[in-house]
Amino acid sequence: MTDTPEKRGFEEEALPYMDAVYRFALRLAGTPDQAEDLVQETFLRAYRSWDQYTAGTNVRSWLFTICRNLFLRQRERGQRHQEIVSKESARDGENSGGSVINPVWASTADRDPEGRFFASIVDEEVLRAIDDLPEDYRSALVMSDLEGLSYQEISDALEVPVGTVKSRLFRGRRQLQAVLYEYALEMGYIPPRPTPGAEAGGGA
Amino acid sequence: MILDSIRRLFGSGARPNPCEQALSSLQEFVDGELDDAARQEVEAHFRKCTNCSPHLSMEEEFRRRVQEALQKPRCPDALRSRIMGLIEEEKASG
C-alpha cells in the first residue's frame, strides 16, 4: 500500500490507542498471548482499511469494533457475526428489567451500605469476575468503565442500539457486583450479621 | 429497617416518587449520561436523601474498584514494536 498523507494520519490518530485496544483485547481473549495476536491483527486490519475510516469520527470506537469483530469471528469459527449480534441483542431488549434496589446493596445494607468491601478485593479476582461475564456484557462494561466511552460511542462500536447498551451495562454490572459480593463474603470482607443471641447480650 | 422505609416510600401511587426516580437513574447518573437538568435533580436528591445516598456510594465504590483493576495492563513494548514493524512493511510493500 502506498504511503500517502492519509496513511500517515493512521500513525497520529490510531496508534496512540494501542494501550486501550490491548486492555480491551485482554478482556475479550482472556490470555496475554491471544490478546497480542488480536491486537496485532486489529491494527493491521485498521491500517489496511484506513481509507474507509471517516475522519472526525471516533477512532477508538472504530478500533474496538474491528477488534471485537475479529475476536467473535475467531471464536465462532464460521458462524456469521450478524447471527451472534442479533441473538445477543434479542435477549437484551430496551428495558434493563431490573429492580431499582440493587440486590447486593439489599444484602449488605445493614453491615456495609456503602460497599466498602469492594476495595478489599484484589485486582486478579476483579479481573477474573469480569472475564467470566458473557462477552456482550463484558465488552460494554470495559468500553464504559475502562475507556469512558459514552453510550452512543459504545452503541457505534458494538453496532447495537443505545437501549441495548444500557441494558448490557446494567445487567453486566449487577452480575459482576453479585459475584464480587459472594467472593467478599467467602473472604470475610463483609462483617457477619450479628446473631440474635449476641444482639440481646444474652448469657448467664 | 432501611429496606422497610424504602418499600414504604415506593407505595402504590401512579407517579414515581423521588427515590424511585433517582435510583432508576443511578446508572445514567454515574455514567454522566443525564442532561444537565436531570443530573442536577438527581444529584440534589442523593445529597439530601439518607436512604438513597448509600446506593450512590456503593455504585461509585464498585466503579472505582473495577476501573482500578482494568487500568493495570499496558501494551507490552515488544508487541508495540512488532506492530510498528508490520505497518512499516505494509508501507514498503505498497
Image (tube, coloured by chain):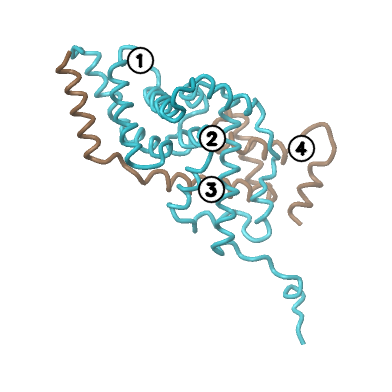
Looking at the rendered structure, whether the residues under marks 3 and 4 are on a common chain is answered as yes
Q: Give, as a three-letter code, the residue at label 1.
A: Tyr
Q: Which residue is denoted by mark 4 in the rendering?
A: B17
Q: CA distance from mark 1 to mark 2?
A: 26 Å
What shade does chain B have?
brown
> Quick check: marks 3 and 4 in contact, CB under 8 Å?
no
Closer to viewer: mark 1 or mark 2: 2
Sequence order check, earlier mark of 1 and 2: 1
Q: Which residue is denoted by mark 3 in the rendering?
A: B62
Q: Which residue is denoted by mark 1 in the rendering?
A: A53
Relative to B64, residue A149 above or below: above
Q: How many marks?
A: 4
Q: Give, as a three-letter code, the residue at label 4.
A: Asn
Relative to residue A14, is residue A134 drawn left or right? Answer: right
Outermost right residue: B12
Q: Which residue is denoted by mark 2 in the rendering?
A: A137
Closer to viewer: mark 3 or mark 1: 1
Outermost front residue: A78
Sequence order check, earlier mark of 3 and 4: 4
On the image, the x and y values in percent for residue B18 come to: 73, 38
Closer to viewer: mark 3 or mark 2: 2
Q: Give, as a three-letter code, the residue at label 3.
A: Phe
Picture residue at 79% right of the left edge, 41% below the top: B10
Q: CA distance from mark 3 to mark 2?
A: 16 Å
What shade does chain A have?
cyan
Q: CA distance from mark 3 to mark 4?
A: 26 Å
